[in-house]
Amino acid sequence: MNSGRHIRNTRLKKGIYVLPNLITTASLFMGFYSIIASIQEKFFVAAIAILVSMVFDGLDGRIARITNTTSKFGAEYDSLADLIAFGVAPSLLAFMWAMSSYGKLGWMAGFLFVTCGALRLARYNIQIGLIDSKVFNGLPIPAAAAVIATTVIFVNDVMGIEGIFHNPYVMICVVILAFLMVSNIKYYSGKDMKLFARMPFMTFLVVVGILLVIIYKPEVTIFVITVGYALSGPVWWLCKVINKKHGTETDAKDLPGGEK
């Protein structure tokens, strides 16, 4: 009797939750589609596919938590999908779009991005519950991918440059993003935001204003937001260092024999 119950429980554990993993698959598909578009030199389409993949990636975890369908399998599958959609896809996009003419330096920069993205995901998985959920330790890989994707869109729509865009600054940007992912610089996670809670009236108006700006000039606004977020970590870190140094100097002056 007990053995039969154990077999049934084992079979149940072998199953997977369909809805959140289906959304993760959709994110993976958009990442794969971005790779195909990059190979075909449809760079704008490849960039849009990465951003759509980000939307699905943001939905799967939230839906899993809302429906109480979180699982170890789902978490591992999500990380593998992220590596393809936000590691391989943007790396190949950057290489085909702007770095292929630099030979070994170009593909080495692309490989560095993929490697650091994989390390970032592995570190994130083992640090769950060990660090404050309000911050990310290092630049999240979807944010790094978004910088590359929105840069392609910005250059295409705003600067009017279509097709291949060979520029050394893109390669430098890819390398910087790679190192930011594996750094210990903290980034705001936004997990403590209570979108369904009551908020001041002016806060609501500000949110509506931001949405209107995004709708009016999405290619510019999204580019500024993604680049701004990537820079927010180093700026936050620099401010903390300056404040800490200033506090140390102030304490030294307060000691006996210090400057008056």
Image (spheres, rainbow, N blue to C red):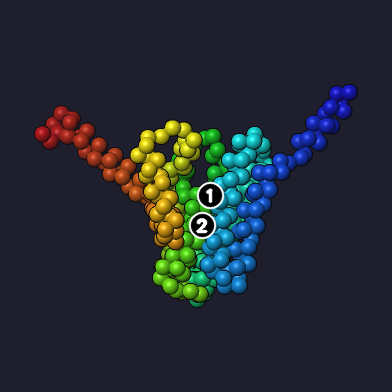
Residue at 61 percent of width and 40 percent of height: 63
Left or right: 81 as drawn, with respect to 173: right
Q: Secondary structure at mark 2?
A: helix
Per the rendering, the mark at residue 183 is: none
Left or right: 191 as drawn, with respect to 11: left
Cα distance, mark 1 to mark 2? 13 Å
Q: Give the mark, 1 or 2, whose residue is nearer the N terminus.
A: 1
Residue indicated by mark 1:
120
Residue 168 falls in which quadrant of the image?
Answer: bottom left
Residue at 48 percent of width and 71 percent of height: 98
Q: Quadrant of the N terminus?
A: top right
Q: Is residue 104 above or below residue 195?
A: below
Q: Position of residue 244 (x, y in %)?
A: 29, 39
Q: Rate crowding at label 2 as few (under 14), some (14 to 19) or many (20 or more) other CA atoms within 10 Å.
A: many
Residue at 71 percent of width and 43 percent of height: 18
Q: Is residue 175 visible?
A: no
In the displayed image of the protein, which residue is found farthest to the left? 260
Q: Is residue 79 above or below residue 66?
A: below
Q: Position of residue 229 (x, y in %)?
A: 41, 51
Three-letter amino acid code at the position of disc 2:
Ala
Per the rendering, the mark at residue 145 is: 2
Q: Quadrant of the C terminus?
A: top left
The reply to whether callout 1 and callout 2 are in contact (CB within 8 Å) is no
Q: Is residue 252 above or below residue 117?
A: above
Q: Position of residue 8 (x, y in %)?
A: 83, 32
Disc nearest the viewer among 1 and 2 = 2
Residue toward you, 225 or 166: 225
Residue 151 falls in which quadrant of the image?
Answer: bottom left
Q: Is residue 251 visible?
A: yes
Q: Position of residue 256 (x, y in %)?
A: 15, 29
Q: Secondary structure at mark 1?
A: helix
Three-letter amino acid code at the position of disc 1:
Arg
